[in-house]
Amino acid sequence: MKEINMQSDANHGVEAAPGPRIDRRQFLKMMSGTALGAALMGIGGLTYMSRIEPVWFETVHVPLRLSRLAPAFSGFRLVQLSDIHLSSAMTGERLSEVVRSVLALSPDLVAITGDFVDNRRRLQQSLDDITQALRPLVEATQVVAVLGNHDYWTGPGSVRQMLAGLGVLELPNQVLALEREGKSLYIAGVDDVIERHARLKSVLEQIPETGGAAVLLAHEPDFADQAAGARRFDLQISGHSHGGQVVLPGIGPPILPRMGEKYPLGLYTLEGMFQYTNRGLGTIPPRVRFNCRPEITVFTLEPEE
């Protein structure tokens, strides 16, 4: 496989080197003690970080050549959404805006890589809002998904019920085989890694050892080390890290979650497999973003020449 250059509607890349992991108290102390931090922590900076960038969605186009992709799937368009985290910052109305943008891309498949919700007290309202926003997408194209750690912490049974009722195909350690002209493209999913529900061996048993490219949905990007070691996946797509939500120039994201520290945002290659980490749509507290816009990712797949 060959590494490629990404393009975005904002004409800038999305990769950044991972920064040191610190907790939020240390982060706020660090921010207030630097010139850049002082500017960002000012009234104008806080308004931008909390109200403007978190809803300034970016569509990132990622063309990839996969060695095992059959020519029948040339031009296959896979759109990834991740980490909706429906909240006062990421509302149902804003998710509907995202859906309209995705529909305009004419995807062959949409994959949502976990963390639909994070508020147990507002769980049912959040699920109702997500259902209403995603319905036009499900009616127009096939949608697959895996759960994330926040879904498990909030209400996995309710999230699963919502997805099934809506018509989203969840892939908890399962594989979907797409067929074109007698050839297959395998879309696999592992259940949440942090909650120890991932069963990679079971997933591999469902994919033929030879023939056909395989794409893996895994909420936590650092699972790529295990996925690449299997040498059967051409691409893993993940979320979880939100890109750090704040990316400091020359430093990178100062706060990264467990299992999101090695591959926090953008495109990587390891052991012949591509790993891509989407920056997510929503946020977790503090619900701010800087230099790390919410993302819709469009993968256009081609066979290797």
Image (spheres, helix red, strand yellow):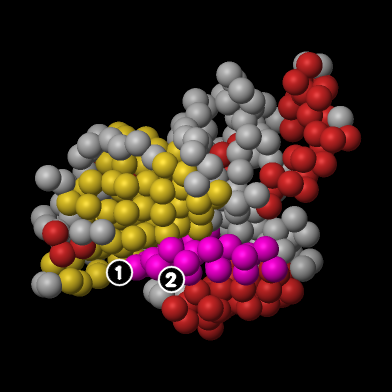
Quadrant occupied by the N terminus: top left
The one of 253 and 21 positioned closer to us in this rendering: 253
Residue 55 spot, x, y in % from top left: 68, 52
Name which residue lies at 71% across and 30% down: 23
Asked whether 100 falls inside the magenta stretch, the response is yes
Residue 297: assigned label: none
What is the secondary structure assignment of the residue under circle 2? Answer: strand
Residue 169 spot, x, y in % from top left: 42, 73
**Residue that lies at the very extreme toward the top in this rendered image:** 34
The amino acid pointed to by label 1 is Leu
Name which residue lies at 25% across and 69% down: 177
Name which residue lies at 63% across and 78% down: 132
Asked if residue 21 can be seen in this view, the reply is: no
The one of 44 and 202 positioned closer to us in this rendering: 44
From this view, report whether residue 92 is shown above or below residue 237. below
Task: Look at mark 1 in the image and give the residue it sits on.
Answer: 176
Asked if residue 132 can be seen in this view, the reply is: yes
Residue 143: assigned label: 2
The segment highlighted magenta reads 93-114
Q: In which quarter of the image is residue 88?
A: bottom right
Count of labels shown? 2
| Residue 73 as seen in the image, left or right of residue 57 | left
In primary-sequence order, the first of circles 2 and 1 is 2
Asked whether 52 falls inside the magenta stretch, the response is no
From this view, report whether residue 8 is shown above or below residue 102. above
Name which residue lies at 30% across and 69% down: 176
Classify mark 1: residues with Cα within 10 Å, few (<14), some (14-19) or many (20+). some
Residue 242 spot, x, y in % from top left: 58, 44
Q: Quadrant of residue 155?
A: bottom right
